[in-house]
Image: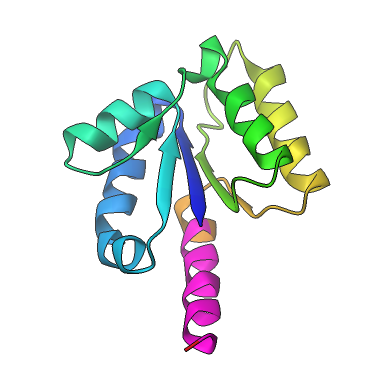
Amino acid sequence: MKLAVIAHDGKKAEMVSFLNKHYNFLHQANIDIIATGTTGTHAQNAGLKVRRVLSGPKGGDAQIAAQVAEGQIQAVFFFRDPLDKHPHEPDINMLMRICDVHNVPLATNPATAEMVLRGLTQASDSKK
């Protein structure tokens, strides 16, 4: 399974904290993490194993959306900062639309991401 993680600048620390909190589950469930450039750098600096694509404003959101459309990504965690303007808003909207079109879970905050992980845990447990 592949999980994409993206975070606006004001949410990068929160994303890294979330991933660290759930490291054991992600590792045990053999979930590969792909991240946009800067988010991925923050995660790697925290000791997490992630594969990076371009930063969001330089096309990383579009790269992740393409992988969602191709069925290569099964969930997206995009911790958005709703209180700030983002020049690449069209890319963000496109990614969200692609997730909806392909019925891929999209969590835009830690509470929703927590629920998605609980669902993955239950799915994992039912396969045992």
On whether residue 109 falls in the magenta region, the answer is: no
Is residue 28 shown left or right of residue 56?
left
Residue at 64 percent across and 23 percent down: it is: 62
* Extent of the magenta region: 113-127
Number of callouts in the render?
A: 0
Residue at the image position 47 percent from the left and 18 percent from the top: 54
Q: Residue 24: x and y, percent?
A: 26, 66
**Residue ID at (29%, 43%):** 16
Asked which quadrant contains residue 12, the reply is top left
- Asked where in the image residue 59 lies, by quadrant, the reply is top right
Residue at 76% x, 38% y is 98
**95 lies above or below 84:** below
Horizontal and vertical percent for residue 72? 61, 45
How is this picture coloured? Answer: rainbow
Rendered image quadrant of residue 40 = top left
Q: Nearer the viewer, residue 13 or 44?
A: 44
Name the chief secondary structure element in magenta.
helix
Residue sitting nearer the eye, 59 or 118: 59
